[in-house]
Structure formats: C-alpha cells, structure tokens
Amino acid sequence: MLFEEIDDRTKAESLKGYELFIKKEEAEKTRNFLKDNEFYYYDLLGCSVFWDKKNLGEVIDIIEAGGGEILIVKEPKGKERMIPFVNSIVNTKEIKDKKLIITPIEGLIEI
C-alpha cells in the first residue's frame, strides 16, 4: 500500500517513530494474513479473563507502559485490575472465544 505523497524511501523514513492508525474495517480485511497465534490488539477488548477457573472480569482497555502493555480488567462489581500483558502471565490461545487465561505471579492478584 502506498500513502499519498509518500513515494520514496526518504519520505517514508521521515515518518519513523510516528504511530499509524487505521480503521477497524480496514484491519479486518487483512485478518486472513494472521497466523493461528496472532491477533489484533482490539481483539483483546471484551475478552473474559479467567484465573483458576474464576472469571475475574473483562478487558476494557490496554495501556502502554514503559516495559510493555497492561490490560485493564473490570470486575463485575466495577473494580478495575491491571494485568501485565506478557506471555508468562496471559495465555491467548482461546482469544477466538473471547477468553484469556492468566497465571499471575504471586501477589499480583488478591481475591
């Protein structure tokens, strides 16, 4: 895909460091290019989060932090939790079913 007026490498390099946003409808047109274990970040929104078969709530936001992304999970009673979005904690294998399984480190979550 070419961007209007960005027709050479020098012009493209001038955009380095900028964020690119596209409409969800445009992203969906490329979903068939994703591998089995790949997804779009917006797929995380609305996922139910489970720990030890207990539903902790649903992902309502993703924030960028210095060391990576943080999932904001809202419990049914309204409390919000912050879960680091790292492979060792968040299992995304059931994301197609809008389900995330977490294995938090000790002390991260108290119930």
Image: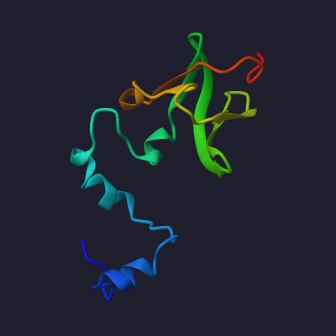
Residue at (27%, 85%) from the top-left corner?
7
Q: Residue furthest left?
A: 32
The colour scheme used to paint the residues is rainbow
Return the x and y of residue 110 as percentages of the image width and height: 78, 18
Return the x and y of residue 58 as percentages of the image width and height: 58, 32
Question: Please, is residue 106 above or below residue 90 in the view?
Answer: above
Judged left or right of residue 29, residue 54 is right
Given residues 5 and 60, the one toward you in this image is 5
Question: Please, is residue 5 above or below residue 88 in the view?
Answer: below
Given residues 69 and 57, the one toward you in this image is 69
Residue at (78%, 20%) from the top-left corner?
107
Residue at (76%, 32%) from the top-left corner?
79
Given residues 46 and 105, the one toward you in this image is 105
Return the x and y of residue 35 as percentages of the image width and height: 27, 38
Return the x and y of residue 46 as percentages of the image width and height: 51, 37
Q: Quadrant of the C terminus?
A: top right
Judged left or right of residue 32, residue 84 is right
Judged left or right of residue 49, residue 39 is left
Q: Residue furthest top?
A: 52
Residue at (58%, 36%) from the top-left corner?
85
State which quadrant residue 56 falls in. Answer: top right
Q: Residue furthest bottom?
A: 5
- How many tags in the picture? 0
State which quadrant residue 70 falls in. Answer: top right
Q: Quadrant of the N terminus?
A: bottom left
Given residues 91 and 10, the one toward you in this image is 10
